[in-house]
Amino acid sequence: MVAAQQITPELQRWIVEQASAGRAPEVVLQAMRDSGWSTEVAEQALEDTLRDHLVEQARLHGLPPPVRVPEPMATDGSLLCSAEPLTAGAVAGVHVLASLMNPRIVVLGGLLSEAECDGLIELAAARLARSETVEVRTGGSEVNDARTSEGMFFERAENPLCARIEQRIATLLNWPMDNGEGLQVLRYRTHTEYKPHYDYFDPLQPGTAAVLERGGQRVASLVMYLNTPPRGGATVFPDAHFSVLPVKGNAVFFSYDRPHPMTRTLHGGASVLDGEKWVATKWLRERRFD
């Protein structure tokens, strides 16, 4: 009977062996089902065993332990939120265009409608100022030569448009809406860029502790493209040799389960070669961001 199935040390060792051999979680899960394990027990065993293994490996190598992160796809590869009621301005569906596991990157098509993209630009345009970055030595912010865009922040759910988009993101990523910063809108003019960087806060910097008091670490980023520039402006991931072209309404999601370069989430915004690029960024935190 299903109730009698137990997660044994032998099963845990087998799961670790499969993961170490490079087998994807969904393949291991199916093999367990084929051997007679119930889906519920198999999923729990896989999740608990891999989490404990990663924590132990991090400890042995002096690395930060991994934490739970948002995830837009189920273990079977399906999108968790593919559609929503067709209210005014809503999108008909979100599609996975590309998916990488290491680093964890998912390119999403049709996350925003044309009207939503135009609406965010219109609401943000009058409030743009030279973009700043978090100064982790002090916990404040400052203008940085590596970031040559103009930008602004909305408060979370500041207006109906932001609230609708943020609720869609929360559903899509299975992550509480309150565990996110407000949307940031950026405009990159011709020949402006954002050089490669990490979005998490460096734990070795003295100002990080103050930053983490509000919501803990960042654990994922979602960059939404509000227009399609004529040339340039790709989001680049140097460690993965991967780039995402900015297409209006599309987005790129990436997560990082610890504040360490091992996540391979180094990324940047390539120079805009013609026209301008508008993006909206949503950063997700470990816990409620106030």
Image: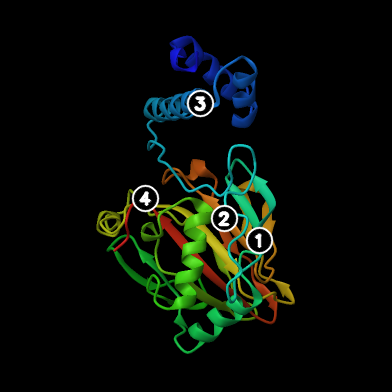
Q: Quadrant of residue 181?
A: bottom left
Quarter of the rendering occupied by the C terminus? bottom left
Determine whether the residue tagged by mark 2 lies in a helix, strand or loop: strand
The residue located at (60%, 58%) in the rendering is 252
Residue wearing tag 2: 253
| Viewer-proximal residue among 167 and 10 | 167
Mark 4 or mark 2: which comes first in sequence? 2
CB-based contact (under 8 Å), mark 2 and mark 3: no
Q: Amino acid at mark 1?
A: Gly
Q: Which mark is residue 46?
A: 3
Instruction: Name the side, left or right, on which 205 lies relative to 19.
Output: left
CB-based contact (under 8 Å), mark 3 and mark 4: no
Residue wearing tag 1: 93
Distance between mark 2 and mark 3 Cα atoms:
24 Å
Q: Amino acid at mark 4?
A: Glu
Q: Amino acid at mark 2?
A: Phe
